Image (cartoon, helix red, strand yellow):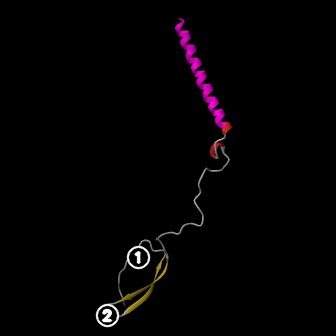
Amino acid sequence: MLVGQFTVPHDTRPGVYEIVVSCDDGKDAVGDLKVIGGGKHEKPDHDRPSGHVRTGVGGSVEPNSTQVALGVGVIGMAAVGGLWLLRRRTESTEGS
C-alpha cells in the first residue's frame, strides 16, 4: 500500500491524468487521476451579445430623428407656454 499527498493546481482542466510516483526505496507506482470539476473553462463557441435589444419597442432599437424633433418641439412649446403664463401673471400683479 502506498500513501501520499499532492495538490492539484487550481487551473487544471477536467480530464484523466497519469501520475507516476517514485519512492525512496526505488519502487514506483503508476495511477490515473481523474479531475471532474473546477479549473479554467474553455471559451464558448459563440461571442457575447452586444448592442441594443432589438425587440421593436419604442426607442429601444435606435433614436428616430422624427421622434427626437417632436420631443424637442414639445419641450420648447412647454417652455414658451410657461414663460407666457409667468409674464402674464407678473403683468396682472403690476396693474393692481
Identity of the residue drawn at 63% across and 29% down: 74
Query: Residue 77 at what x, y percent from top left?
Result: 63, 25
| Residue 76 disc label | none
In space, the residues marked 1 and 2 are separated at their CA atoms by: 25 Å
Query: Residue 19 at what x, y percent from top left?
Result: 43, 85
For the residues bearing labels 1 and 2, Cβ distance under 8 angstroms: no
Q: Residue furthest top?
A: 96
Query: Residue 3 at what x, y percent from top left?
Result: 35, 86
Looking at the rendered image, the quarter that the N terminus falls into is bottom left
Residue 11 sits above or below residue 82 on the image:
below
Q: Is disc 1 placed on a helix, strand or loop?
A: loop
Identity of the residue drawn at 60% across and 52% down: 51
Residue 86 sits above or below residue 50 on the image:
above
Identity of the residue drawn at 63% across and 45% down: 60
Q: Is disc 2 placed on a helix, strand or loop?
A: loop
Residue 64 sits above or below residue 92 on the image:
below
Magenta residue span = 67-96
Residue type (three-letter) at the residue carrying disc 1: Val
Which of the two discs, 1 and 2, labels the residue nearer the N terminus? 1
Q: Is residue 58 magenta?
A: no
Identity of the residue drawn at 42% across and 89% down: 30
Query: Residue 29 at what x, y percent from top left?
Result: 40, 90
The residue that mark 1 highlights is: 8
| Residue 25 disc label | 2
Side of 2 relative to 41 (left or right)? left
